[in-house]
Image (tube, grey):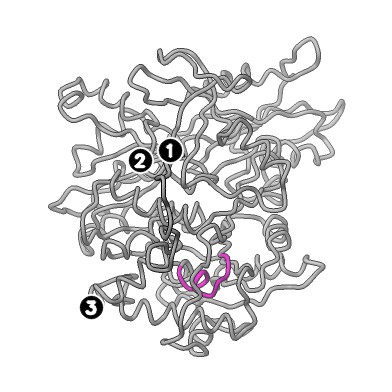
Amino acid sequence: MGWMKDETGLEKRPANHVPLTPLSHLARAASVFPTREALVYGDFRISYAEYHARVSRLASALAKRGVAPGDVVAAMLPNIPAHVEAHFGVPAAGAVLNSINIRLDPGTISYILDHGEAKVVLADTQFLTVLEAAIGAIEGEQPLIVEVPDEQAGYHASGRHLTYDALLAEGDAEAPWIMPEDEWESIALNYTSGTTGRPKGVVYHHRGAYLITLGTPISWRMTLYPRYLTIVPLFHCNNWCHVWAMPALGGTTVCCREITAANIYNAIADDGVTHFGGAPIVLNMIVNARDDERRDFGHVVEVFTAGAPPAAATLAAIETMGFNVTQVYGLTEVYGPATECTWQDGLWDDLPPDTRAAIKARQGVAFPNMDHVTVVDPETMTQIPMDGAALGEIVMRGNSVMKGYYKNPRATAEAFAGGYFHTGDIAVQHPDSYVQIADRAKDIIISGGENVSSVEVEGALMHHPAVSLCAVVAKPDEKWGEVPCAFVELKDGARATEAELIAFVRQRLAGFKTPKHVVFADLPKTSTGKIQKFDLRQQAKTL
């Protein structure tokens, strides 16, 4: 066990054992960096002392409104200061933050709010109508809506709900925070994109959130005072936990509501942004920006990219423009990135550009906060040959793995079978141990960094009265990486057009889940009647 022969008097005490939590980063920053710029959004600019005070007001105001430790507070917000503040203010009230994808349909939002039993929802004015429809469908207790107007973006208060500023005014800037008594306490509840039907609630603990905030700066080569641009949505794995990390470094979080090439270039040139993360679509946006959108800047910008391997041509282009791109890989269940393609200086520097790009497209090796990431035979849990050819499933274990799926012990047990978290992603492993995804299990489509369930899209299409059978696969797309492509068999004598079916699905699902192409054809099937999606994926590549 590694114990000494005599451990008398060496037990845990308040002096030597404090529960790990990212809340401690902001508490320290308010003392160490009180006047440094902490949070930026256009004309909104606050110091760490002001940041801490606003978080204290939010936490105490939520408590006065009846939010108790362990309660869920939801947020339906873009990347604006209120959402960043909620990442500290909600757990500082002892509550659990549930950041909801702003692109979801009312039915899914309603399910998430009901399943998570949210007491309060912080909602941007832009999304009020969708949220009100979602809440109206909840049969049980409905959460309090706190409206967050965004005057800079032209979204003015509706007058129908308590506003965020009014809520803060109810709070106390000097109020003490409710720190976790146990670092295993829950800090966040994040719902997956529903790759197997209903989304599952992934529960994060304070310990995991804290450790990834220290692992990420090591992997990202961060030093003090980085200037971080929030391109990754705050509802995606809590922005890959980056906003929790910034106070530890005295860094500045620069909010970006609308992800455009012009906004990214302006943030780099005007606000000195040094780091951001995003899907390959963001890299394409930067490379293909118009001349009037581009800005000159004199420093290297470090970029984490994930969601799908960036095209070699994109990497080759962007690296001549002042950006250094690192491929990372992860899932909601592991707090965002869990592996990175760590660059081997002196070994890979002089390789031909195509070879360098191919290496950079690997998912790589474990973050410092993870214990072990490898590829195994999922049936036997034995290591596959590291030859770059044998296929297996990526599995992980470490300090930043979820507690489990909320109210779903069966799915939790399945995910953790054999002592590892099963990602469901199929990969090869190279002789140097670097992991590289070969295919994605369960026919997941990754569009613009969003997971799309082919089963869910197929289910929506099957509701159309003219559809007899359908199958949805990924079609490569220059802008989005992948988009859903539907192959449809119609009922005898029935008629439907591509535009009609696309509009039909759009009424039922979020826009990113809607097929961008519909092909009418007899579907290829096995002798047992199973649709051969491999053939359809090959067809989709030629469309």
Q: Quadrant of the C terminus?
A: top right
Q: Residues under labels 3 and 2: Cα distance?
A: 37 Å
Q: Nearer the viewer, residue 129 or 237?
A: 237
In the image, 259: left or right of 351? right
Residue at 80% x, 69% y: name it: 140
**Label 1 amino acid?**
Asp
Which of the numbered marks, if any, corresponds to residue 299? none
Which of the numbered marks, if any, corresponds to residue 284? 2
In this picture, which residue range is highlighted in magenta? 88-96
* 139 shown above or below 440: below
Q: Which residue is mark 1?
A: 371
Q: Residues under labels 1 and 3: Cα distance?
A: 37 Å
Q: Earlier in the sequence, mark 3 or mark 2?
A: 3
Q: Residues within 10 Å of mark 3 (few under 14, many from 20)?
A: some
Which numbered mark, 1 or 2, is in the foreground of this view? 1
Q: Secondary structure at mark 2?
A: helix
Residue 490 falls in image quadrant: top right
In the image, 468: left or right of 119? right
**Label 2 amino acid?**
Asn
**Label 3 amino acid?**
Thr
Q: Nearer the viewer, residue 467 or 103?
A: 103
Q: Secondary structure at mark 1?
A: strand
Which numbered mark, 3 or 2, is in the foreground of this view? 3
Q: Residues within 10 Å of mark 1 (few under 14, many from 20)?
A: few
Q: Earlier in the sequence, mark 1 or mark 2?
A: 2
Which of the numbered marks, if any, corresponds to residue 35? 3
Count of numbered labels shown in the rendering: 3
Residue at 18% x, 47% y: name it: 300
Magenta stretch contains residue 522: no
Q: Earlier in the sequence, mark 1 or mark 3?
A: 3
